[in-house]
Image (spheres, coloured by chain):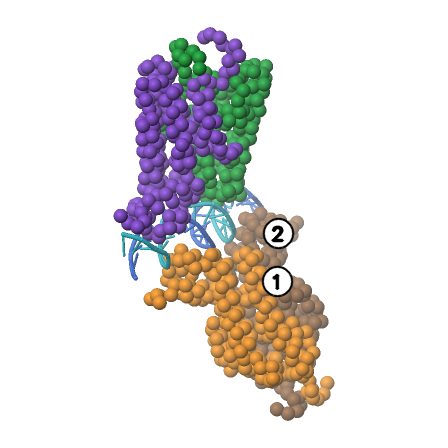
Chain colours: A brown, B orange, C purple, D green, E cyan, F blue
Amino acid sequence: MPAVDRRKQVLEAAAKSFALFGYKATTMDQVAKIANVGKGTIYTFFTNKEELFDEILHAAILEMKRIAEHILREDQDFFDNLYRVLDALLEFRDEHALFIKLSQEQREFGTPKANDSLTKVENVIVGYVQKVVDNFIRKGEIKPCDSQVVAFVMLKLYAALTADFNNLREPLHKDQIKEYMMLFLADGLRSSAGTKSSE
Amino acid sequence: MPAVDRRKQVLEAAAKSFALFGYKATTMDQVAKIANVGKGTIYTFFTNKEELFDEILHAAILEMKRIAEHILREDQDFFDNLYRVLDALLEFRDEHALFIKLSQEQREFGTPKANDSLTKVENVIVGYVQKVVDNFIRKGEIKPCDSQVVAFVMLKLYAALTADFNNLREPLHKDQIKEYMMLFLADGLRSSAGTKSSE
Amino acid sequence: MPAVDRRKQVLEAAAKSFALFGYKATTMDQVAKIANVGKGTIYTFFTNKEELFDEILHAAILEMKRIAEHILREDQDFFDNLYRVLDALLEFRDEHALFIKLSQEQREFGTPKANDSLTKVENVIVGYVQKVVDNFIRKGEIKPCDSQVVAFVMLKLYAALTADFNNLREPLHKDQIKEYMMLFLADGLRSSAGTKSSE
Amino acid sequence: MPAVDRRKQVLEAAAKSFALFGYKATTMDQVAKIANVGKGTIYTFFTNKEELFDEILHAAILEMKRIAEHILREDQDFFDNLYRVLDALLEFRDEHALFIKLSQEQREFGTPKANDSLTKVENVIVGYVQKVVDNFIRKGEIKPCDSQVVAFVMLKLYAALTADFNNLREPLHKDQIKEYMMLFLADGLRSSAGTKSSE
DNA sequence: AATGAATGAGCGTTCATTCAT
DNA sequence: CATGAATGAACGCTCATTCAT
């Protein structure tokens, strides 16, 4: 085990810088300085800027997925699950915020390949959420709907409330985010069994 | 009337390129090539890249606002209004898509000034929607809530469904977008008069 | 005869601009605007910027030469002549200042050819002054010396006092210029207070 | 010690190019090519073109001043001092030629800041010489005169003979330059052959 | 003949990437 | 290995020159 894990230093520095300044505005010099390593060192671990970016993206995804899978309980209802998963995810909000913002920065990347990579990652998340949504549609807990659209909107809603909103006002509190997520998702999606007495 | 309107050619090429690749990744050479004009020609119409960007942004905003104001009827209820405004806005979806995407590309722009300009524009929209939401909260048509958050989410929802989603799948149809907008916003926000028989 | 002499307008505008801003910093747009003609018009009279510059230079030279020849009297002594020629030249100081400054801007021109042209013109003046100096050396009125060096210094001295000095202080008065020209050329700085009684 | 000192290479190339072609006409590509380095290398040493120019200017000035101060002897007369200082300065003539020419290129620089910097530097030299001249006027060694004008003319004379003159003919020899400096500053052209005994 | 909209080569500058140490 | 000095392709922008009107 090395005294210092240079690879990890680089990853953390890059994550911070990408989240703070975006892909294009993050320079390799900056990353090297934050990571306290030589610029060339970055290239011993990552072929190029794009791959460094990719790795960070994938790591964030993996962790989010790990958290979600750990929390999900098939034997409980959708909104309970949603609530608990949100709770867990928001615990790491600051770490995700990094990813979230990157995801928002759509179509702003240097190379088409970088764009594709971002889209691909996003698709993975949406696909995962979609499967969960499908499950609960089958169980009749939420209205029949296009699960992909719903999954996509859930992601965007999470991103909007955790990250984007900060440009407009001071960040929302954890509880506020949950409250608004539930407002839009729960009451709208909640299986109509008995609600809305008339139509 | 000139055989070809170069200014318009440039604006359209730039809008297309900004929407497709973002601000930073759009090069003036690219715009010139798409517009089928010399690079210098762009600079006869626009002082610099930033101003070209600004003009496109503001034009999109103005038109959206004009449409919204033309459609809004204070004497009808919130969801009818929402429905009709969406209808009208979606008519010009392709044109807005350009702006929408730009708006999504948060915090990634070249100069601080360009960022500010984008934020300012977004704030104007949110502020406008917020006022409308406030109005209808007062009338008791929608639940009491933080109107700024709701306005912001509405914008993001519109953006997500009209523009972002296209990276994932083929674009949604006009009617689908309306349907999902109403799903998340209407049933969730609708004044609770009588809903949720149990809880 | 045309209502307005466009060629003359261009020449005057260019002279003013070259003198004010120098060769490189003078743009054809600027010249056209000052001359109140279309930019293309300039190119009906002059092949390119360089030639426009050349013509102005030559015109200034020709006039200076004309003035000098008109004033020179072989039958009077060198310093009388110097005095009277200076007098006449200083009458047109403002016009020359233009040329003088250009001449000072050595090695700053766009193309080697433009540089050559400037050098050539300067050589013509020096050559002319040199012949006059030679004449008076032969007559024994001034010390034997390298007439080319002396001619060159005379030109530089004139330029320094009429034009360059203005960057340092307010312009010198006509009489002051003459006084200092005579001081350096005729007498030198050495205090007459008894020093160097003989040699 | 590196095999090659790139910073020095750049400085020398830039000095040569500035002196040869002037500020505006010197391109960074050119400097890079002459210095035999990549264009980007220049920017690892100097923030921008202007700063590169400034550094060269200031270095030349500092050295001239250092030389002059080292040589000046208050206890010896003005012309002896002048003679010795000239002697020392001419030793480095080639190095100064660079600065001198730049100084001649008045009012032709890219940015106002570059111009100011040049003017400021020139003012420093003139101011310094002026103080020395004042001293010797007080001592009665040279005629009462406007010391600023005299200082300015001395500078221009030095510049004319060391640098400008080379455009006209092959460079003057060290001894010739001294001879002519003394001729104009000390004695004047007037033939001593009894002419104009009085005035 | 006169114009000025259109052009593109060329500028100063940045930064991802390489490679000698 | 780890480094950072060195690189040059690519950027936004300027302006002398051209040419359709």
Comparing marks 1 and 2, which lies closer to the viewer? 1
Mark seen at residue A98: 1
Count residues near mark 2 (Cα–Cα under 10 Å), then give few for <14, some for 14-19, many for 20+.
many
Chain label for disc 1:
A
* Furthest residue in direction top, as rendered: C198
* Furthest residue in direction right, as rendered: B199
Q: In which quarter of the image is the C terminus of chain B?
A: bottom right
Residue B168 in picture, x, y percent from top left: 51, 73
Q: Name the residue under label 2.
A: A35
Question: Looking at the picture, does residue E17 appear above or below residue A179?
Answer: above
Residue C88 in picture, x, y percent from top left: 38, 29
| Front-lying residue, C142 or C176 | C176
Question: Looking at the picture, does residue F14 appear above or below residue C136?
Answer: below
First in sequence: mark 1 vs mark 2: 2
Chain label for disc 2:
A
What SS does tag 2 mark? helix
Q: Is residue A96 in view from this perspective?
A: no
| Front-lying residue, D103 or D173 | D103
Q: Name which quarter of the figure residue C55 lies in.
A: top left
Residue D117 in picture, x, y percent from top left: 53, 37
Q: Which residue is pictured at 48% across the width and 78% down the height?
A: B91
Label 1 to label 2: alpha-carbon separation: 17 Å
Q: Which residue is pictured at 51% across the width and 72% down the height?
A: B63
Q: Which amino acid does label 1 sit on?
A: Leu
| Front-lying residue, B145 or B25 | B145
Q: Which residue is pictured at 57% across the width and 24% down the height?
A: D131
What SS does tag 1 mark? helix
Q: Is residue A20 left or right of residue C110?
A: right
Labels in figure, total: 2
